[in-house]
Amino acid sequence: MLPTLLPAASADLDLAAWAWWATIGVAAAVLAFDIVVIARRPHRPSTRELVAALVVYVGAAVVFGLGLWALAGGQLAGEFFAGWLTEYSLSVDNLFIFILIMASFRVPERYQQFALMIGIVIAIILRGLFIAVGAAAINAFSWIFYVFGAFLIYTAWTLAKGGETDDDEYEQNRFMRMMSARFPATEEYDGTKLFTSSSGSRLATPLFFVILALGTTDLLFALDSIPAIYGLTDEPYLVLVANLFALMGLRQLYFLIGGLLKKLVYLSYGLAVLLAFIGVKLVLHALHENELPFLNGGRGVPVWDIPISVSLGAIVVILGVTTAASLWRTRRNPELVQD
């Protein structure tokens, strides 16, 4: 019989309702403050401003993880760090599309920060709904992990098949085309206003459609990222907090690493390996939990449930190798980096 290799027993995170609301309240206050400040003074943020904000967000995530380690143990802390790193890495892939959206709508640099903030708020709300649906599905159907795992493996295959892409245009999805037909619009920006008046008519500004494009595009990415993080932790609270920290630091990454993104030529392959790994982990977890009766003469087959320490190490290695290999390739072949 195959040996059963089990991780250390995972602690349950039993939180009172006030902890959920406090987390949501703090995140909402921080985002509202950012939106108000940016709306009052639209500008392209300086490097110093971006680095300071990113250090605060990343530092807060690290402090949260260490605090979780002290209060709830290394298992849950490891799940949070693995989920946070995964969400951050998948969010970097979003930035390619965000850059294309900004270019397609010809968004002036001074308004891009505001558009990103509103788009991120929409993304957080929509992801919150996805997280709740995912938690309900996991509680109701034990076989949902097979579905999540198979979906992630399929997504990994499509990413790897796409390889190094040269797409430099943004194509509107069906929802965006419907909204464009529904709202009369002007081609002129009017500060950070989403609607403006012209000749007695109320018209949507291009910024309105930019924000819709950013929010709905992220929702499509959430179809991959939410199952992926549920492959690392089954605690909805950790899924929510990991998403909050990843998305709240996304605006700074957009401005800081815009040029570096072009050098990450192997990013699709790296993310494909990452999603495939988590997909396999989900399938193994489902087999471990269910021990299908038709295997091994009706006794089931003990399956290795990959510990979070192995998952966290694999994530770090995959992301590190992807970045190093991409930078090495573009350094030897600078023509791959398009202006």
Image (cartoon, rainbow, N blue to C red):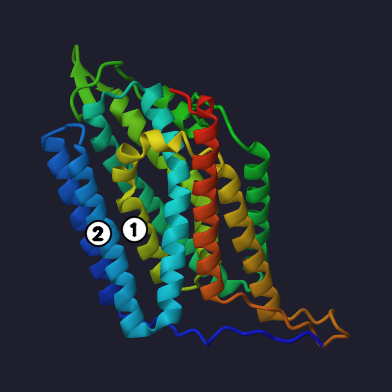
Q: Residue furthest top?
A: 199
Which residue is at 44% across, 83% downward? 12
Residue at the farthest front position: 332
Q: Residue at x 86, y 83 (%)?
A: 296
Name which quarter of the figure residue 307 lies in.
Answer: bottom right
Q: Is residue 273 above or below residue 64?
A: above
- Residue 239 placement, left or right of 143: left
**Sequence order check, earlier mark of 2 and 1:** 2
Q: Where is residue 271 drawn, in percent x and y?
A: 56, 50
Q: Can you identify the residue that label 1 sits on?
A: 244
Q: Nearer the viewer, residue 77 or 121?
A: 77
What residue is shown with label 2? Answer: 27
Q: Position of residue 237 (x, y in %)?
A: 39, 70
Indicate the amino acid at tag 1: Leu
Q: Are marks 2 and 1 in contact (CB under 8 Å)?
A: yes
Give the answer, above or below, for where 188 lies relative to 160: above
- Label 2 packing within 10 angstroms: few (<14), some (14-19), many (20+): some
Where does residue 54 sit, x and y in percent of width and height?
Answer: 26, 51
Quarter placement of the C terminus: top left
Mark 2: which secondary structure?
helix
Q: What type is the residue that disc 2 sits on?
A: Ala
Q: Is residue 162 above or below residue 300?
A: above
The picture places residue 32, in percent across and down from the top left corner, at 19, 50
